[in-house]
Image (tube, coloured by chain):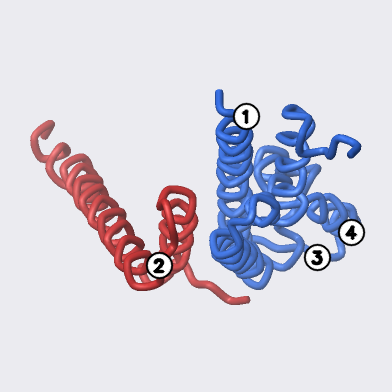
Amino acid sequence: MQIDTNPASMLWLLPLVASIAIVYKATKVRTIRPRSFIRECAILFGSIMVFIIVAALILYAVAWLVTQQLPNILG
Amino acid sequence: MPPSWKDNHALFLIVVGLFAWLVPGAGHFALDERRRAGVIFVAIVLTFLIGLYVGSIGVIDPVGAKSWYAAQIMNSPVVFLLGRVSTGGDYPVYGRPNEIGQIYTSIAGLLNLLCIVNAIYMAHLQAVEGTGD
């Protein structure tokens, strides 16, 4: 399978996060009722994605500082 | 009436754990948690199969990627057989497909490890509640 090293390849993490959310919730909920289970999995999926995006933005800012700003500061 | 394997607490826990390792979700199935077992089975097996689809069975590398293999083997003993087949070098895979395939199959294995521990814990709770301790 051909997978390029471009930003679109990051989309491969979405099914993985969904799987993690589903399995984790399956071990945690007392009973599995379709509607509430899907809602809880969706909430956990969204939470994980928010944290990943925040971490990515922070890392991007750090990389920008180190590669763009630090050479200017050090002259 | 002769004692069944469910009456021996330690044996019961070991058997549930073994079932959960043999087939993802089978431990919970043995505890009459059918719906939970079905969800776990579908999620873990799909994740593992996606990893194999992306990278081929070459992502299961017991020689060159031991730490990934340690996580992948948690899926099922079937991974041991797949590793034997891929060791021959007939399924080379490199770059992103290799990375993504390894990550998917290893995460599936670690999720199954979580489910094995959860099944053993639920078996312990069932046995304890049954004896009234």
**Where is residue A4 shown, x and y percent of the image?**
49, 72
The disc, 3 or 4, on the residue closer to the chain's N-terminal end is: 4
Residue sitting nearer the eye, B75 or B118: B118
Secondary structure at badge 2 equals loop
Q: CA distance from mark 4 to mark 2?
A: 41 Å
Residue type at mark 1 is: Thr
Residue type at mark 2 is: Arg
Q: Which chain is red?
A: A
**Where is residue B31 shown, x and y percent of the image?**
65, 50
Q: Which residue is mark 3?
A: B91
Secondary structure at badge 3 equals loop
The disc, 3 or 1, on the residue closer to the chain's N-terminal end is: 3
In the figure, the shade used to draw chain B is blue
Q: How many marks?
A: 4
State whether residue B95 appears in this view: no
Q: Which numbered mark, 4 or 2, is in the foreground of this view?
A: 2
Residue type at mark 3 is: Tyr
Q: Are marks 1 and 2 in contact (CB under 8 Å)?
A: no
Q: CA distance from mark 2 to mark 3?
A: 42 Å
Q: Could you classify mark 3 by the number of other residues whose Cα lies within 10 Å: few (under 14), some (14-19), or many (20 or more)?
A: some
